Image (cartoon, rainbow, N blue to C red):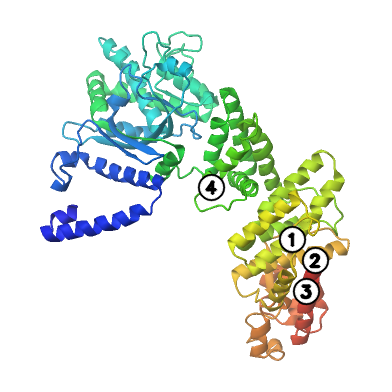
Amino acid sequence: ATSCHAAPRARSMRSLLLVASSLHSVACSMAPFQLVNMSFVLTRCINRNASRVIRGQLPSVFSGCSFTDRSVSTSAATDDSSLDTRRLPLGKIFQDGGREYLFSTRKNIRDYEWTIDEAEDLFESILSLDDESDPLELGAITIMEKLMSKEEKKEIGKISSLYDVHDGQQRLISLCLLLAAIRDNLNKWPGCDGDANEVAGRVYPEKNRLPPVCRIDVQEKNAKSLRLILSKIDSHGKIVSDLLGETSPLTPIKNWKNLPQCDQRILEVYKYFVNRIEDLGEENTLKLVERFESDVYLLVCIPSDTKIARNIVMGQGKGKNIEPVDEFKGMVCFNRINDEIVQDQILDRWNKLSDEVGRSVLEEACILVAQGELGKVLRKNCEVDLLEDYLNKFMTKEDADGKEFFETKVEPAAKILKQFYDTGVQLVGKDEEAPSLSFLQSATSIATSKEVKIVILDFLLKHKELRDVHDEAGQISIEKQLKQLEGIALWSMLTKPKPKVRFQRCINILLSTRSATDTDPNGLALLREEKEAIREILNTAEFGARAGEIKKVKAMLERLNEHRLVVQHQNRMEPLQSTLHLEHILPQNHNNVESWTNNWTPQQSSEWKHRLGNLVLLNQKKNAKIGNGSFNVKAEHFSNSPYPLTNQISKHMEWNVASLTKNHEDTIDLATEVFGL
């Protein structure tokens, strides 16, 4: 519209019609929640320019918009969702004695994270306001009205509202700490008692015949310091006149280092504000309060459901360090547990588990189990929806709650997946019959076979359950299934079926193992055509030519070497992926080495150099020493290799087409035996 304002009227109309037509087409294809998000974005853009509209700095096309300097309230709705946005001055949100806006961050998975640096930025921004300044916009916060029982509603007042904070926790707590610091300084200055009481009512709004409440409440484990600062009432119900004085429960300050990090930050920011207000003096502080009330704005977004709230937060670029598993943690610990003490206990256990196994492993474990339980493919950016569906399915059980879900589903899956990655799963079967968890780990790290991990985790969880009840026969049965699964992983890795086909194959395996049939009790047998496809690829593929193929052949060769070691009654080798190198026996570049050019024509070299029979595993340091040397030089190094298939190459007198072809066939035969082809 701004560009159209400067253009001739006719062209402006044509342009607007074209734009309107295009936007209408897009809108018709959007889902309801996307339309809600779009309306939020448009509203936010207009709100950002509201003051310019008022002063006539935007084209007249906007002149009909009903904005005021004090606040803007808009809403967008569909049949099943809505979004209310309000541009409000802080004086409206932090109203003296008002309980229209009370906040809770108990369900927010993040702690208070602001340091003095962020607090200083906030303070300086408000302090810089004067009569000539534009209003200060502190951005958007996303809150949802908390569902409360009649009894809970009576506690805060029938016309009061309590909101769960999805985004804005840092700013809201910091603003409360600033007001508390202003209150405490005003209390020290003569004649400012009335002003101090008014500011106190903004952070600790009291009502006749109603219990007092703090403007904002946090998780119970971090609530003590904040509640004391906002209320000035200690745990014994006594008023603390000087929060930083010698008799205060918050002192001595040197002991703050022993408190949880969240408490430390709250106290440090409060102390910083106290010092800044003290330096400011009475007159300037009262001016600061006036600016705070009328010239500082928040855009308050109140969606009707959590999905819209989540999309708004992520759409604003917030929560970048929040992963899907963190949101899932909030659902399990807060939404599915009623007892607040149990909520905090499970939250602590979840955090300890995350530290123990790693957040990425914890998230992957939850997603893998969810896919297996629901039989649903993970869609892009839909991790939270998948996890929520999984949780909802579990909650259909009688008396189910988040504690049981964490203890029976989340915790075991995360720990087993971590053991799988660390090759720490204890197997009981004989070496010849035991599966190679190292191969399964390598194979499922490749995109075309990653879905197999869904089955692996399911089998390992069953294996653990059987180990816990000392059922050795049952464990061996699961281990045999895992060994069969190696063939499925190889098929998926090499033949590269479409994602839907791979996923459905894995789900079918899970279904068949849960209700075995006579023809294929485990659903794990490779079909004849699948075996033929694998053998054809093993015979013809140029595994040594590209990085993706090199990763595959390294996994296969490591498995074949492991099998040969077991047959020779030697110990399995520890995975050496970090130093493992794929060596071309016939070098890729050998034109200047006479011993190679005498035995190989350019056509023969081109045909065979990247094929399976010309590839062996070697330690990276040894590869650096060998380079493109002659076969005799290579054979000497091969003879010292711990890998049997590499070692046996040293027994050849020369490396020509005949010897390579023989090794190629032998390697394929070994793969046929190991993978049941």
535 versus 447 height, above or below:
below
- Residue ID for mark 1: 486
In the image, what residue occupies the spot 27% across and 11% down?
Answer: 194
Mark 4–mark 2 Cα distance, whole angstroms, equals: 36 Å
Q: Earlier in the sequence, mark 3 or mark 1?
A: 1
Residue 455 percent location from the top left of the image: 69, 53
Which residue is the site of mark 4? 383
Q: Earlier in the sequence, mark 2 or mark 1?
A: 1
From the image, state whether disc 3 or disc 4 is nearer to you.
Answer: 4
Of residues 582 and 487, the one drawn nearer to the viewer in this rendering:
487
Q: How far apart are labels 1 and 4 at the CA level? A: 27 Å
Label 4 crowd bin: few (<14), some (14–19), many (20+), radius 10 Å? many
Whichever of callouts 3 and 4 sits on the residue coming sooner in the sequence is 4
Marks 3 and 4, how far apart at CA: 41 Å
Residue 674, disc: 2
Helix, strand or loop at label 4? It is helix
Residue 667 is labelled as 3
**Residue 527 position within the rendered picture, expressed as x and y whole percent measured from the top left:** 74, 67
Circles 3, 2 touching at the beta carbon (< 8 Å)? no
The kind of secondary structure element at disc 3 is helix
